[in-house]
Amino acid sequence: MKLIVTVDSEEDNWGNVRASHYDVENIEALSDFQTLCDDFRVTPTYLVTYPVVTDETAAATLRTLLGDGNCEVGAQCHPWNTPPFEELESKRNTMLCNLSDDLQHKKMAVLHAAIEQHLKISPVSFRCGRWGYNQNVAMNLAKLGYKVDSSITPFTDWTAVGGPDFSAVGPRAFRTTSSTTHRWGNSRRFPSRSATSDGSASTCAGAMQCSGSFSAGASRARASPEYSRERISSEKSGSHQKRPMQRR
C-alpha cells in the first residue's frame, strides 16, 4: 500500500464567494507541516489557489519549500476567485464543471500562468475546487499539459450542491483514450476523456493521468474507509445505493 498526501493550500476561511481581498496567513504553517512530512519521509503535493500563489508572502513560503526538493506544488482552481470573472456569481458557478469549456480554459490557464510566474515551475497536478470535474475539464487539462487530476471523489454524489455524480466510480486507476467517451452515474463507467499528445489518459479515484507518469504525491482517494467497506459489501450482495454528499 502507498500513501499519497495532498494538501488543499487555499485562502483562509473561504466561503465560495467573490471578495476584494483574501487572507492567506495559513500558508505560513506549511513550513511546520513540511518538517513533519520530512520526518516521515512523505513527499506532499500542495495544491494552490489563485489568491495564494499571487500573494507574495505565501509565494515566498512555497518557493522555499520547493527549493528544498521535498514537495510538489500543483494547481487548485476555485472559479469564484480565479479570473477572468465572466460568469454570473452564483453557487452553481462555483463548480468549474458548470462553466463553459472556453471559460474553464481561461481560468485554468490564468492560474497555471500565475504559478509559473510566481513559483517558477510548470505545475502538472490539478484539482477542481469543490470537486467540479467533468469531461471538458479533462480536455482542458490536456491542453495545458497537466499529467494528474485529483478531482474525482469515489462513491460520492455532489449533485445536491450542483456538482457531478461520482457514485459509480471506484478507487482504482483506469485509462481512457481520446476516442473513448466515458460517462458516470447509473452507467457505472468511469468519467473522463482527454485528447493528449499520445492520445491516452489514465484516471483513478481522485486522479486522472493525462500523459506520462504519475508525479509523486499527486492524489488520494477521498471516500472514507467505512463507506468503502459499505460499498464493497453492497456490491458483493448485488445491491448499490449511491451516497449523496452535502458538505463543501
Image: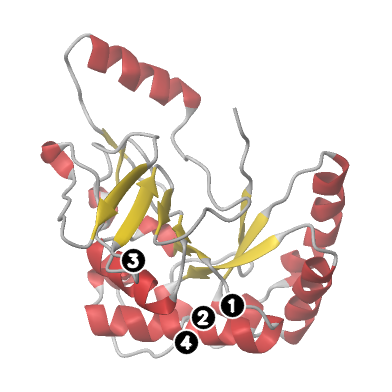
Residue at 84% across, 60% down: 31
Left or right of 97, for residue 61: right
CA neighbours of label 4 inside 10 A, class few (<14), some (14 to 19), many (20+)? some
The residue pinned by badge 4 equals 110
The residue pinned by badge 1 equals 122
**Residue type (three-letter) at the residue carrying disc 4:** Val
Given this view, does label 1 or label 4 mark the residue nearer the observer?
1
Report how far apart the C-alphas of labels 2 and 3 lie in the structure: 22 Å
Left or right of 47, for residue 97: left
The residue pinned by badge 3 equals 198
Q: Position of residue 128 (x, y in %)?
A: 42, 63
Q: Secondary structure at mark 3?
A: loop
The residue pinned by badge 2 equals 112
Q: Quadrant of the N terminus?
A: top right
For the residues labelled 2 and 1, say whether their Cβ atoms are less than 8 Å apart: yes
Q: Position of residue 109 (x, y in %)?
A: 44, 84
Whether residue 213 is visible: yes
